[in-house]
Amino acid sequence: MQKTEKFANNLKKLRTDKGISQQQLADMMVVSRSAVSMWELGARLPDVSMIIRLSNCLGVDHSELLEIFHESQDESSIIVVEDVPLLLRGNIRMLQEELPDMSIFGFGSGKEALEYARIHTVSIAFLDIELDDRMDGLQLARELAALNGQTNIIFLTSHTEYLQQAAYDHCSGYILKPLNRERIRHELNNLRYPVRGLGRFLRSPLV
């Protein structure tokens, strides 16, 4: 049995033994349900940081998952950074509805998001500006751009006073909360940098 298949089967067993649905685990992990589905199908493998989060959510020792884990091929992903858990889960779910087959990950702090971006390719980053930690969204955007100059930065905020700075930093988009499907569609169709394969996931225009 290949390692990917072994990991997939083990993850599914741990989840079902706990009586947790894929959607519930996705909500706990702050990722899309399709990400969990891909892991359990063996189509993709989570990275090490996701393994640790999975272990915590499932209440098992890290080694139980790490021992059958090997590094996966890096792939482009979308991240959402928002320090209000309820908003973060809602934004993840809304993006999943528009992009059901894309890898979408949520983070509650700039530091956690930056750690992820250091080892993965981030094609689009939806960033709250006034984050409740030592790194605000503007600083995080600059750090992400330094790691990958082709990352599309889309600010998601309740404040208009950062528009000038966002334009100066050449961000891809600026959305005033709350996020909605129309704004998601607009920003994804007007990205500063192209994202391979994104077009085939976009649905027909809203009517």
Image: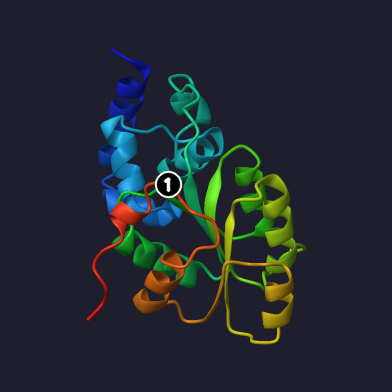
Left or right? Give the position of 131 relative to 158.
right
State which quadrant residue 154 falls in. bottom right
Which residue lies at the image location 63% right of the left edge and 85% below the top edge? 159
Q: Residues within 10 Å of mark 1 (few under 14, many from 20)?
A: few
**Up/down of 84 relative to 21, above or below:** below
Q: Is residue 44 above or below residue 106?
A: above
Q: Secondary structure at mark 1?
A: loop
Q: Position of residue 16 (x, y in %)?
A: 25, 40
**Above-or-below relation of 93 to 53:** below
Q: Is residue 24 visible?
A: no
88 or 44: which is nearer to us?
44
Q: Residue at x 56, y 42 (%)?
A: 121
Q: Quadrant of the C terminus?
A: bottom left
Q: How is the image coloured?
A: rainbow
Closest to the observer: 103 or 169?
169
Q: State which quadrant residue 89 falls in.
A: bottom left
Residue sitting at 37 percent across and 53 percent down?
32
The quarter of the rendered structure image containing the N terminus is top left
- Relative to the observer, which residue lies in front, 123 or 105? 123
Residue 117 vs residue 85, the one in the foreground: 117
Please tell me which residue is depicted at 46% across the width and 27% down the height of the picture.
72
Q: Amino acid at mark 1?
A: Arg
Residue behind mark 1: 196
Q: Is residue 59 visible?
A: yes
Residue 170 placed where, x, y %? 67, 67
Answer above or below: position of 207 versus 18: below
Residue 195 percent location from the top left of the image = 46, 51
